[in-house]
Structures are given as C-alpha cells and as structure tokens.
Amino acid sequence: FCSGDHLNEGFHRVARLPSLDGPLNLGNPAEFTMLELAHLAKELTGSSAPIEFRPLPADDPRQRRPDIRRAQELIQFEPTVPLREGLMRTVADFRERLRETGAL
C-alpha cells in the first residue's frame, strides 16, 4: 500500500521524464496482508464490524509487492509514509468530510 501523496508525486516525476522505455512500478515494497490491513482499519476507525473472509478471485495476485528499483533509479521515488500513518490520515480525512456533510 502506498499513500496517494507519494503516488501523485511519482506520477508527476514520471511525467517530467524526457522519455520512458518499459514499465516503471510505483508503490510500496513493504508487504502487508489483507488481514493486517483489516485489523489496522478496525483499530483506527473504532469499528466493531466483523472481518469477512471470502475466496480470492482466480486471477488475484498472491503477492502485492512492487519492484520499485527502476523508479528509485530514474525518478528517486521512495515511499516514506508508513501504512499506519497513511491510514490515520485517510481516516481523519473521511471523518472531516462526513462532519462537513453532517453525516457524522
């Protein structure tokens, strides 16, 4: 998982390249399971909702860990916001939006 701020910055850096031949992966090479993400989301939101387990789609990747070495070399891309911090920012943003609409 990678923060939107980092991805946005990465896209801007790619757009400024004079040329690009081949793929360039942007993302976070730190790997987290969906279960770890679910537990963290519950913790940060205070949710009491149960975590549901469902079969994975046949084409679902088993590993979600991008190889960002090329991005590091070409555009000095390096995600620095840890998952917990990025999720905390996201939760705070959604709470603020809900307050503004009166839904919270």
Image (cartoon, rainbow, N blue to C red):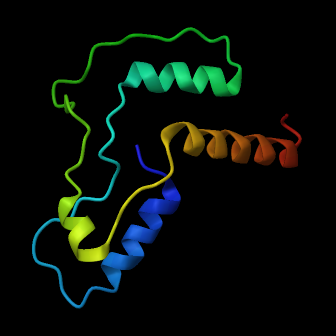
Q: Residue furthest right?
A: 102
Q: Residue at x 51, y 51 (%)?
A: 81
Report the quarter where the N terminus lies: top left
62 lies above or below 28: above
The x and y percentages for residue 51 are 50, 11
The x and y percentages for residue 23 are 15, 65
Report the quarter where the C terminus lies: top right
Judging depth in this view, the residue of 4 and 49 nearest the camera is 4
Q: Residue at x 19, y 51 (%)?
A: 67
The x and y percentages for residue 57 are 23, 24
39 lies above or below 75: above
Q: Is residue 95 left or right of residue 70?
A: right
31 lies above or below 74: above
Q: Residue at x 23, y 75 (%)?
A: 74
Judging depth in this view, the residue of 100 and 27 nearest the camera is 27
Q: Residue at x 29, y 46 (%)?
A: 29
Q: Is residue 87 left or right of residue 10?
A: right
Q: Residue furthest bottom?
A: 18
The x and y percentages for residue 34 are 39, 24
